[in-house]
Image: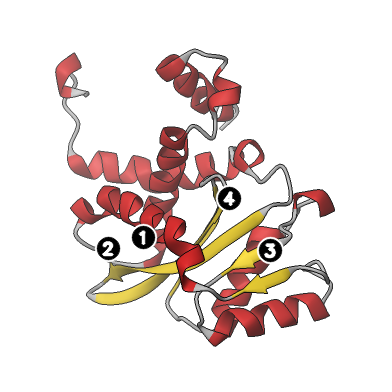
Amino acid sequence: MLSERGVEVDHTTIYRWVQRYAPEIEARLKWYWRPRSGVSWQVDETYIKVKGKWVYLYRAIDKQGRTVDFYLSSRRNAKSAKRFLGKALRGLNEWEKPLTINTDKAPAYGEAIRQLKKEGKCPKDLKHRQIKYLNNRVEADHGKLKRLINPVRGFQSMKTAYATIKGFEVMYMFKKGQFKFWQYGQGLVGEIRIITNCLLDF
């Protein structure tokens, strides 16, 4: 895109931009894409390669396929699942929290939800359903996101991986239409306006 406009930019410059701005954009746009009503969530993890080793990208989407939250972890256990779900639930009003969470049969999710309920961070009446076919939508969603990630051909550290993935996730949310209401029918111009406004005082 920059070349088409006669601007020469080295790939390392793009890399530095991503590392610097992607986490900031993700954090500042959180208010726009956070869940607005308590519906069912589909939660699952997928694999990302970092420094030649597989790590785990936890992701959650709602019933309409909108991204709820995501979290990169070097481990796949109850502690990581709890950290992810706690992050997804943090700051939500009671009516924004899910009524149901669908996961696969990994025991880590059940333990994580039990601990969160005990600590009062999760609704006591939340239903946890461990039925694999109910998670087909989130598994398909992983595939679409990974088509953006795969050309990177791996990351060299968890820090750079997470920063880059934050950028990919936000751009994917734009593609899903999660910011459509705030674009006021302006399409690409609306996307640019939202991102520009969120970085005005940066």
Amino acid at dot 3: Thr
Residue, disc 2: 155
Residue, disc 4: 63
Q: Earlier in the sequence, mark 4 or mark 2?
A: 4
Q: Position of residue 98 (x, y in %)?
A: 71, 58
- Between circles 1 and 4, the one closer to the viewer is 4
Please tell me which residue lies in front, 189 or 110.
110
How would you rate the neighbour count of disc 3 (Cα within 10 Å): few for under 14, some for 14-19, many for 20 or more?
A: some
Q: Quadrant of residue 80?
A: bottom right
In this view of the protein, can residue 21 be seen by the observer? Answer: no
Instruction: Give left or right: position of 74 versus 96.
Output: left
Please tell me which residue lies in front, 195 or 179.
179
Q: Earlier in the sequence, mark 1 or mark 3?
A: 3
Q: Earlier in the sequence, mark 1 or mark 2?
A: 2
Residue, disc 1: 161
Quadrant showing the C terminus: top right
Q: Earlier in the sequence, mark 1 or mark 4?
A: 4
Circle 3/circle 4 CB separation < 8 Å: no
Q: Position of residue 53 (x, y in %)?
A: 27, 77
> Which residue lies at the image location 45% right of the left edge and 37% below the top edge?
176
